[in-house]
Image (cartoon, coloured by chain):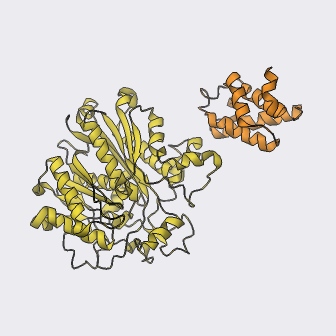
Chain colours: A yellow, B orange
Amino acid sequence: MSGKVVVTGMNIISSLGLDLKSNWDNLTEGRSGVRKIRLFDASDNITQIAAEVPPEFEEYSRQYIKKRAGSQMTRITRICFTCAREAIAQSGLNFENVDKTRCAVILGVVNTGNSSSEKDTTLQNSIFKNMTNAMSAWISMEYQLMGPNFVVNTACASSAYAIGLGYDMIKYGQADIVIVGGADSIINREEIAGFNALYALSVQNDPPWKASKPFSKDRDGFVIGEGAGILILESEESARKRNAMIYAEMAGYAISSEGYNIMAPMKDGEGMAYTMEKALKNAGVSTGEVDYINAHGTSTELNDRYETMAIKKVFGKRAYQIPVSSSKSMIGHTIGAAGAIESIITILSINNSILTPTINLDHPDPDLDLDYVPNKSRKKDIRTAISNSFGFGGHNATLIFKKYPNFAQ
Amino acid sequence: MVKITENIRAEVTGIIYNFFADECEVDLPTINDNTNIIKDLDGDSLMFLELIEIFKKKYNLDIELKTIGKYAVKHPVQTIGELIEMQMRIIEFENKLLETDK
């Protein structure tokens, strides 16, 4: 096992913006990206709202994607690629100056979004658009990286798994730099109907921005979001060698399976608690050191109840002193991208000493009594924070990030 | 079998030039018969297949892709000019393309 794994670049594209700054500004202002669906006519769907990436994305992306390559990508692959280009630019990396055989790409990808919402699919590009490995492949090709590039699918925990696997590759000396993260869009007629059939989605269509309300007593399901989150993980040695800005240390993580149910989490949050405990142990972090939890917080009845129970089980009485907030209240559930986007929000919270809020928490569930940072962001010094992701199929992940001592904005 | 005329040659040349200018986002005047498809235009092999489909539809050609593949192995294409010549032969000889090598 080598030295520390650090984060040297990151970027988010979501319903709240096309770059990191606009996302952060909107998150700290407590704004919602949820609107009436524009990607297709949802008037026949029970749920008619989602957190879509702004339509200005296509124009914005042209500076990063050549026309021909863009025609071979789905819209969400273009979102992922654009997000990665900017994260890499932000990291200051010049791949000509590093050993490309030691640079990898690992992304969480549930699907490529080649659905009925996708435009301009032809026989010539349908295979490329459907390849679930396309997102990591395009990034790898752009920079001629020769380390492994692959994707991992563990539903809503996919990009958290990708980050964990990237961490391991560096920790065990198999890579110096790993581009990790994920992207997802399931805003299409079929999948919304499918999730409606499972009673998983909010049906509170009006007003859209009030629908995602984690930990509220009137929560009725998650709101679908879309977007991408990309982080540059790097060995501390490599980052220091090139005088890179270090945004945070990734201290450890855990992934686990519940072996229980294809949809529901294990009762009383037992699997979630086990995952958090295992992550703390892996990172060598005590429960007393954790200053903030970025919750999975989906706004579903069971997740929010069980995640609260799990946090209490792991942290005991101290659970009441740890702020817990859900970014999904503002950007919806970005499925395969959620783990990465929320990890980045966690790191930004550490570096800016600001907790992003859980918005729409006007009527708290009396059974859920932790500090969920209701409705308004808050100043707080954060040295260690965790990010939870839990997926259909019982895929759990907890990632742990620490403030990097020399970080200065 | 299509009898090649000057009009057909001009039409095929125009389609190929415009296809590469459009797909590779380069100005049309920068393309000539000596332009290297990979090195100069950052093109790819899929473009070749897309052009074959365009011409198959346009001239109602009876030719199998494997025939073209076998021919291309013996006559690799690197430049726009070479590609035009190959497309002319495909249009002219269709499935008898390989016989022209004998």
Check the image and report above or below for A51 versus A127.
below
Q: Is residue B4 shown above or below A54?
A: above
Up-down: is A176 above or below B57? above
Determine which quarter of the picture holds residue A240. Answer: top left
Residue A41 in picture, x, y percent from top left:
57, 69
Residue occupying the point 27% across, 72% down: A215
- The residue at 22%/51% (across/down) is A400
Q: In the displayed image of the protein, which residue is found farthest to the front?
A: A259
Residue A34, image x and y in percent? Answer: 42, 68
Residue at the spot x=42%, y=48% of the render? A83
- Where is residue A257? Give x, y as percent: 28, 56
Residue at the top extreme of this rendering = B102
Tell whether A95 sits left or right of A169.
right
- Left or right of A3, for residue A29: right
- Which of the pair A80/A111 is nearer the observer? A111
Q: Is residue A160 above or below residue A295?
A: above
Pick the front one: A248 or A168: A168
Where's residue B63, x and y in %?
78, 37
In the picture, measured across the screen, residue B31 lies left or right of residue A280, that is right
Which image quadrant is residue B59 in? top right
User: Which residue is found at the position 44% from the left and 69% from the top?
Assistant: A195
**Location of the N terminus of chain A (image quadrant):** top left
In this view of the protein, can residue A409 be seen by the observer? Answer: yes
Judge whether residue A372 can be spotted in this image. no
Q: Nearer the viewer, residue A25 or A301?
A: A301
Label total for image? 0
